[in-house]
Image (cartoon, helix red, strand yellow):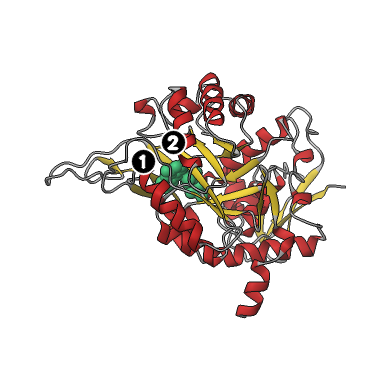
Amino acid sequence: MSDAHEVQTLNDSSIAIDFAGIHFKNPFMLSSAPPSMSPRLVIRAARLGWGGAVLKTVTENPTVDPRTRLGALRKDGRLIGMNNIELLSRETVDTWVRSYIPQMRKESPEGFVLIASIMSSPDPDSWTTLAETVTSAEVDAIELNVSCPHGSPEKHMGAFIGQNPDLVESVTRAAKKGTDLPILVKLTPNVTDVVSIAQAAKKGGADGVSAINTVESLIGIDVEAATPLPAAYPTAPGTTFSTYGGFCGPAVRPIGLRVVSQIARADPDLQISGIGGIEDWHSAAEYIMVGAQTLQVCTAVMWHGFGIIKDMTAGLAEFLARKGYEDLQSMVGLALPKLTSWEALDKLPPVIAKITDACTGCKKCVIACADGGYLAIQMRDGKAVVNPEKCDGCGLCSVVCDDNAVEFVYSS
Ligand SMILES: Cc1cc2nc3c(=O)[nH]c(=O)nc-3n(C[C@H](O)[C@H](O)[C@H](O)COP(=O)(O)O)c2cc1C
């Protein structure tokens, strides 16, 4: 792709969108995380074409983090998820307000959206004060972090607040008191009923919600050493310890999509910034189609760098053009009318699997159907063939097929 084409795509106005009263040249933001923790990083992202950044969360007391604090989930060597036991910014609110944010504003291209992220205790006054303080820097909005699942809840912060609708409403109202800027409330998926939390945020005056923060997790155990991961090293050599952390990356996308769609279905007017496993234009389009207007990315940037923005913006703009959608807003929530209750689904329609010419004869579907299904697939002349009498249409063969060689047809 030529440089000229890249610039043209990054400026493509078809993927601009208005969200919570703010104009975004494209919907892609850095989420509050390491890629937005310093002016060097944010300015680099801004110049590469990101639409905005939610800055690393600030609180009254700067954080001291364990080393190490990141853990990986791999399948056959491929990274599919990550967890972290990192907390918040190591810099003071004063440093952000007097130095970091002004520098980011000055050195970022015009139109780049800067959103401060704040966290405090359930004391409403502390949210009012923090909101007032960050408003004095030139940010466009404020995100309330009531969703960090590790470390913070031990101090009655983060997800301790975000799991309680009354506290969410109270701190949102308090932050609103300290600012005229739009307020987003970042939600935790670690609740039974996320819709009630989103509605509490709205009741407290939120202009939108961001979902999801990380999913509480234990990423794994080093079984040789009988030690949980990630390993936090002690100051002097000795036993490593660990704690529960926040899971993120592609593996959490189904949870993020579920949360965003539930909130959007319950309140189609609520502005939503989608987060969780967004890694390319396709996963971005998925979030938009279930109700997100903007998108936030952390893990994909940490794994692949800020440069992914080029393919994400170009891919999304090309998808819009190919589908004939007028603009991004017209794509928002398009898949929602097709989400219904389980009870409303037709049961036992006469569809069965059919293996297409794309079959490479790997036998994965044969084994799966034999031991996890209905013994409905056999090999014939090096290809898998479905027995229509036995097939139950469950879909397991298409789940295990790496070659996209299964379609579903109505049986005669
Ligand atoms: C190392 C690390 C640090 C994070 N720090 C913050 C933070 O300070 N504030 C916050 O709201 N979210 C924080 N997050 C959560 C991310 O912003 C994001 O919600 C989450 O990772 C899901 O998005 P992803 O799948 O694109 O990573 C952090 C995530 C990671 C991996």
- Between residue 115 and residue 145, name the one nearer to us: 115
Give the residue at mark 2.
Answer: 148
In this rendering, position of residue 134 left or right of residue 223: right
Circle 1 Cα neighbour tier, 10 Å, few/some/many (<14 / 14–19 / ≥20): many
Is the Cβ of the residue at disc 2 closer than 8 Å to that at disc 1? yes
Q: Residue at x 47, y 64 (%)?
A: 44
Q: Residue at x 11, y 45 (%)?
A: 236
Q: How many numbered marks, from 0 up?
A: 2
Q: Residue at x 67, y 53 (%)?
A: 285
Give the residue at mark 1.
Answer: 87
In this view, the residue farthest toward the top is 166
- Between residue 254 and residue 191, name the one nearer to us: 191
> x, y (%) of residue 119?
43, 34
> x, y (%) of residue 73?
41, 49
> x, y (%) of residue 43?
47, 61
Question: Is residue 23 depicted above or below 261 in this figure?
Answer: below
- Disc 2 under 8 Å from ligand 1? The reply is yes
Of the image marks 2 and 1, the number of the one nearer the N terminus:
1
* Amino acid at circle 2: Cys
In this view, the residue farthest toward the right is 412
In this rendering, position of residue 214 left or right of residue 286: left
> x, y (%) of residue 87?
36, 41
- Disc 1 under 8 Å from ligand 1? The reply is yes
> Which secondary structure lies at badge 2?
loop
- Quadrant position of residue 207: top right
> Which secondary structure lies at badge 1?
loop
Whether residue 328 appears in this view of the structure is yes
